[in-house]
Amino acid sequence: MIITRTTDEQQAWSAAARSEGRTIGFVPTMGFLHRGHATLIERVRPLVDELVVSIYVNPLQFGPTEDLDRYPRNPDGDAALCQSFGADCLFMPSTLYPPDFATTVAVAGLTTGLCGASRPGHFDGVATVVTRLFGLTQCQVAAFGEKDYQQLAVIRRAVRDLALPVTIVPVPLVRDVDGLALSSRNVYLSPVERARALSLSRALHWLAEHAPGQPAASVLAEARAMLDVDQLDYLSLVDADSLAPLDHVDRPARALVAAFVGKTRLIDNVAVG
Ligand code: AMP
């Protein structure tokens, strides 16, 4: 596995592979890799000739009070994991943008609710970095986890609207044995906080069982009472495709939650119906 550290190196590596007719798959990440990330790599590996993983903590998608500076890092462990799962190229740039970078990719509509409401500008940062990474890696296939369900919808829309020549492969959310959605941020949780954080997946699974056919407000009130969190950003039932809030759970839906346990913001979601 080769490690590229600048945008020029990555572009040159990808251009050489493409000029030899080799297909490129891509898994973008922010590092501190876990089994969820490994599942994305495993999913793309058999689809392509060359597999690129990127590790970049993208400042554009962090708000001024968020955890950009303390986001966990483990470059050596990440490189070992990528190699063991068969990556051909690990792109680890220290910076991704030229000093006069001036472009924003903004997806309207899908980004107004849920995490878009509690993290203003977040999805502009995500859509912008992913579009730039697609250009740099010249990938034809890219995997995104359903863990970030709204992000996946935003990327799919940007790819469709901008006619980007990349096939998006969605990967189901991977949980720890106790039900907690795997996340790099779980390392922030104390043992007590981690036990409280399990209330997120419990409330979501309760909704998956009890929400179909029901008015959303009543089941959401019951599920909200199950949460043991310090700040709830949202607990919502939305249309699985449009992400529009539902009054009545009468179609394929998604239950999503974002909440702080201690100082750690956690997200999770499940399919409903
Ligand atoms: P991150 O490093 O957190 O930005 O995540 C990089 C990619 O891995 C995104 O597409 C995430 O949705 C995906 N991912 C992170 N955690 C999980 C998980 N527990 N299950 C599935 N995919 C995940």
Image (cartoon, grey):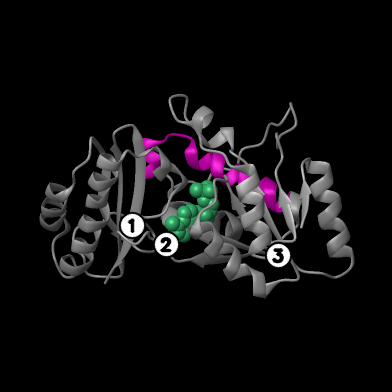
**Circle 3 residue:** 140
Which of the two discs, 2 and 3, labels the residue nearer the N terminus? 3
Label 1 packing within 10 angstroms: few (<14), some (14-19), many (20+): many
Residue placed most toward the observer, 103 or 200:
200
Give the quadrant of residue 48: bottom right
Residue 120 on image: x %, y %: 43, 34
- The type of residue carrying mark 3 is Gln
Residue mark closest to the camera, 3 vs 1: 1
Residue 194 spot, x, y in % from top left: 29, 45
1 and 2 marks in contact (CB < 8 Å): yes
Q: Give the residue pinned by disc 1.
A: 269
Of helix, strand and loop, which one carries label 3? loop
Tell me where the magenta segment starts and ends, as one range.
Answer: 112-135
Q: How many marks?
A: 3
- In space, the residues marked 3 and 1 are separated at their CA atoms by 28 Å
Query: Gap between marks 1 and 2, in whole Å?
Result: 8 Å
Q: Could you tell which of marks 1 and 2 lies nearer the N-terminus?
A: 2
Task: Provide the secondary structure element on which disc 1 rests.
Answer: strand
Quadrant placement of the N terminus? bottom right
Residue sitting nearer the eye, 156 or 85: 85
Name which residue type carries label 1.
Asn
Q: Which residue is mark 2?
A: 173
Q: Position of residue 17 (x, y in %)?
A: 84, 62
**Residue 181 vertical placement versus 103 (above, below):** below
Would residue 129 be counted in the magenta stretch?
yes
Q: Earlier in the sequence, mark 3 or mark 1?
A: 3
